[in-house]
Image: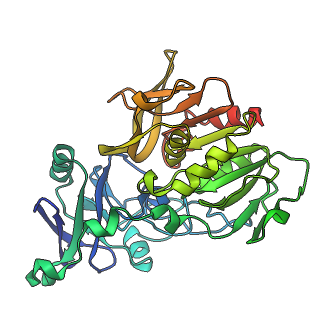
Amino acid sequence: MRNVTLILDDGSRFHGKSFGYEKPVAGEVVFNTAMSGYPESLTDPSYAGQLMTLTYPLVGNYGVPPFTIESNGLATFMESERIHAEAIIVSDYSEDFSHWNAVESLSDWLKREQVPGITGIDTRELTKVLREHGVMMGRIIFNEELKMKNEEFPEQSAVYEGVNYVDKVSCKEIIHYFPSGNALHSAADSSFFIPHSSLKKVVLVDCGVKTNIIRCLLKRDVEVIRVPWDYDYNGLEFDGLFISNGPGDPDTCDAAVQNIRKAMENEKLPIFGICMGNQLLSKAGGAKIYKLKYGHRSHNQPVRMVGTERCFITSQNHGYAVDNNTLTEDWEPLFINMNDGSNEGIRHKRNPWFSAQFHPEAASGPTDTEFLFDEFVKLL
């Protein structure tokens, strides 16, 4: 294992050993407090452009499942077709793994997908630095490169800030999924929306969608028409609009916001958004977004449904939040985070529009709120 160093924007340095692909990278350093689920997290498109720190000390002990693809093109055990995180940072990497579904080690997978991994880092101290200072840009370099002058490295901020990561991870063509397990791929226009069956049809705006979101819709017997994030689907015939999760700054996705506003001209059209979808729906409704100090990335975020005493444990991965104080009179919070009081979802007071900042589909994490998919399908 080669010596490797993580350098933060404030000058902090953390030294460790490489167990993944050996290349220097830069990105936004974030931490995730989940105890398991690294295959799902690494393949979650919402982590694009980020160096993912896992606070749970032992990582890699259950290996990596097979990267099999179903007939509809969805990865069976992953949340997308590849790793999206720029790197993974852990305290103790387990070279030995044991699990009934494991086919390779985390190290071998990272090397195959050309993603760096660092072990031996004091992740408790790193997390304390991030909690105190807030999320920071950082870069991973191998110690031979430490002799290079700072000006020889690219600006870290230029790697993440202002970049439209949604455009990088969104699909580039229309993909039509059927509950039967089949899928059609097409770059066609409205002719692709000719009814194929009597099932309800949902347009899914792909801002970096996780595969389990698509599965959760398909198992409720709806057809899913997955479109690129900036595709104008208005004027087409469909029964509901779904806005997915995704990476980066929602302010880089104005095209999606404008299309949502057009869709909202039909006050009877059901709309459901998750994570980035919550933020984009809020922006379309006139609210503002702000960046959290260090985000919510874990499997144990408690949220309360507003107006009730119902609380849920949720899986989350986001760095931005909706400002409740900027919601217009037609909107109200649907969920509130019980740790910091931040927004966890909104709903329209009259129309069938609602969203969740957390992940009801989990993968990985608790599925306590998967009933939100049932509520959405009932509205179709």
Where in the figure is residue 117, as x and y percent of width and height? 30, 69
Q: Residue at x 81, y 62 (%)?
A: 190
- In the rendered view, would you say 119 is above or below 279? below
Q: How is the image coloured?
A: rainbow
Near-viewer residue (310 or 287): 287
Near-viewer residue (229 or 94): 229
Q: Residue at x 43, y 31 (%)?
A: 326
- In the rendered view, would you say 160 is above or below 30? below
- In the rendered view, would you say 327 is above or below 113? above
Query: In the rendered image, which quarter contains the C terminus?
Result: top right
Near-viewer residue (332 or 376): 332
Near-viewer residue (107 or 208): 208
Q: Residue at x 61, y 23 (%)?
A: 349
User: Image check: 310 left or right of 152?
Assistant: right
Report whether residue 43 is seen. no
Q: Quadrant of residue 227?
A: bottom right
Where in the figure is residue 4, as x and y percent of width and height? 18, 74
Where in the figure is residue 291, as x and y percent of width and height? 33, 45
Q: Residue at x 30, y 60 (%)?
A: 28
User: Image check: 175 left or right of 315?
Assistant: right
Where in the figure is residue 306, as x and y percent of width and height? 50, 20
Query: In the rendered image, which quarter contains the N terminus?
Result: bottom left
